[in-house]
Amino acid sequence: MHELVTDTDNNICILKVSDNLKPEQLNRLKKFLQNCNWIIKPVPTLSLEQMKLAHILLKELGELIGYTGQEMRVLLQNEFCKLREIEYFSLSPNKTNAASKEIATDFITYIIEWAILNNYNLILHEGYGERRTLRSVRDVVPDIRRHVLACLLAKACAVCGTYHNVELHHYDSVNSIGGYEHCDGLKTRFMSLCREHHSLYHSIEQKEFESKFHLEGVWLNPNLVIKLKEKYPNHFQAFDEKKYKVEGQ
């Protein structure tokens, strides 16, 4: 594999190549470089902030499981690349195979969703000593709707991440559809909340809740309702699964 290195002090570019190349191959490469036109094309690689966040998430998750951050990176990155059918990438912006901003965003989201769906409540520890702070993953997740949905599927609180005493919250009033007996999961938005944050929601205005936690309920489709009926058996009373079940399943 070739690697281009710039030496700005001496105003030269160095192309690093395999030392296994034969002299005739090197000569052909030199002639090619002398005769070709050079184009500088910026590539939107991941930012330093994305690199830092990914490593923090992997480190925190690894500590919960008993792995190092590096071991978690290899494990989750292998799974991620296999699912996306993409080549292995670097989380360093300076590497030739650095992830794009889009891939980095997707991978960060994948780490957070993997933690939620595997019952690991990620809390980010940042800084040292008196400046050490704790942050919830909901504050850093790239797509808040996917975060809320992952919490619903894992029966985790979308606010604090706990898996204890988690309830299904109708984000929009069920009175608008005639009550719980008319709820099929498709007419209002939903969110999963622990009892503490469920009670808090009902004690303050919806706009105040959204401003405080930067969260909103999500709309469901029939496939999601079918999955969530198993998690929340006393809900979605009006949902008729037969209407949406595919023949042969």
Image (cartoon, rainbow, N blue to C red):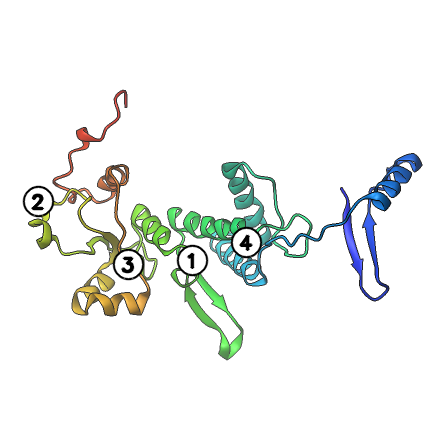
Find out whether the residues at labels 1 and 2 contact each other: C-beta distance under 8 Å.
no
The earlier-in-sequence mark between 3 and 4 is 4
Q: Which mark is residue 216?
A: 3
Find out whether the residues at labels 2 and 3 contact each other: C-beta distance under 8 Å.
no
The earlier-in-sequence mark between 1 and 3 is 1
Q: CA distance from mark 2 to mark 4?
A: 45 Å
Q: Position of residue 233 (x, y in %)?
A: 18, 42
Q: CA distance from mark 4 to mark 1?
A: 14 Å
Disc 4: which residue: 101
Q: Secondary structure at mark 1?
A: loop
- Describe residue 141's horizontal placement relative to residue 127 as left or right: left
The earlier-in-sequence mark between 2 and 3 is 2
Q: Secondary structure at mark 3?
A: loop
Q: Residues within 10 Å of mark 4 (few under 14, many from 20)?
A: some
- Describe residue 241's horizontal placement relative to residue 34 as left or right: left
Disc 1: which residue: 141
Q: Secondary structure at mark 4?
A: helix
